[in-house]
Image (cartoon, rainbow, N blue to C red):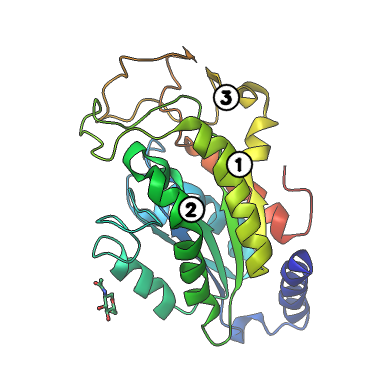
Amino acid sequence: MKLRAWVLFLASISFRNALGVRQRTPKAKIACVGDSLTAGYPFDSGRGPDASVSGYPYHLQELLADEGYEVRNFGKGETTVVSGSKSYRSGWYNETWQEALRWKPDRVLLMFGANDVKESRLKKFENEFEDAFTQLIQSFLDLDPPPVLALLIPPPMYDNNIYGPEFDPPGRAGGMQQKVYNQQLPLKLQELAERMQVSLIDLHECFLKHESCTDVAVNCCDWEAPKPPKRRARPHAAVQQCAAHDDAIHPNDEGYRNIALMVQRAMDGKDVC
Ligand SMILES: *[C@@H]1O[C@H](CO)[C@@H](O)[C@H](O)[C@H]1NC(C)=O
């Protein structure tokens, strides 16, 4: 049913194109909502840090422009689902969230979780994540008409305890926990998607199928980012690291391009990977 909704939507667009009424048809709007993995950090593409030329939303726009879509990037780094000063409900993200709602998207892609698995937020991740995410999803489904909505399972993390206090600037909520992110988060998102009857796009699985990205104990995934400029090297690297790919969580521009392809394939009802 979820997949069918995506396919029917695409079919309706093609049908209108065939009738030659595309000029008068307003563009279908896709809102990409999330944290730095949506915003496009670490902006290594050479196109600059502007949201409109960053992350997977930029590539999705490139792929879908001729099909009558407008893609907008509502990503903001550090945003959490659970409560706190960086919550989507806090002053940190609220305005971006409200703007996304006011835009009245036809489709919404939601990708969160990285900042919810930081050490000091694990209790909240356990206790609050699903309820808070449900409310975020519901806020979009309450739009009239309700958009077609998909949750994205983010790509794997290739190291443990990253972006913690030893980083520059220090991550005050502690390091991101690899096992929770790679194992518990996908399960929670799957349950959530089933319960809310929305689509699920598993980027995590697709990364694990890509040759250099199969082993989360080896940080050599060539779809992942080089060391972001402001982060100094981790002193604790317990995993085998590749010099050029040591961020361990953010995709690089090629990774973001492949995420856009995965999303496009999901929209077309094809195998996502
Ligand atoms: C979020 O934005 C809405 C709409 O602008 C506003 O009514 C609400 O008070 C804001 N909440 C916070 C926590 O800033």
Task: Decide if residue 72 is in sight here.
Answer: no
Residue position for label 3? 216
User: In the rendered image, which quarter is residue 144 located in?
Assistant: bottom right
C-alpha separation, residue under disc 1 versus residue under disc 2: 12 Å
> Which class describes the residues within 10 Å of circle 3: few (<14), some (14-19), or many (20+)?
many
Element under disc 2: helix
C-alpha separation, residue under disc 1 versus residue under disc 3: 18 Å
Task: Decide if residue 144 is in sight here.
Answer: yes
Is residue 242 shown left or right of residue 106?
left
Specify the label residue 58 is tagged with: 2
Residue position for label 1? 258
Which quadrant does the N terminus fall into?
A: bottom right
Q: Earlier in the sequence, mark 1 or mark 3?
A: 3
Q: Earlier in the sequence, mark 2 or mark 3?
A: 2
Whether 115 is drawn above or below 128: the answer is: above
Viewer-nearest residue: 180 or 204: 180
User: Which mark's residue is nearer the viewer, 2 or 3?
Assistant: 3
Label 1 is placed on what type of residue?
A: Asn
Q: Residue at x 32, y 19 (%)?
A: 234
Label 1 CB-ligand 1 distance < 8 A: no
Label 2 is placed on what type of residue?
A: Tyr
> Which class describes the residues within 10 Å of circle 1: few (<14), some (14-19), or many (20+)?
many
Specify the label residue 110 is tagged with: none
Q: Are marks 1 and 3 in contact (CB under 8 Å)?
A: no
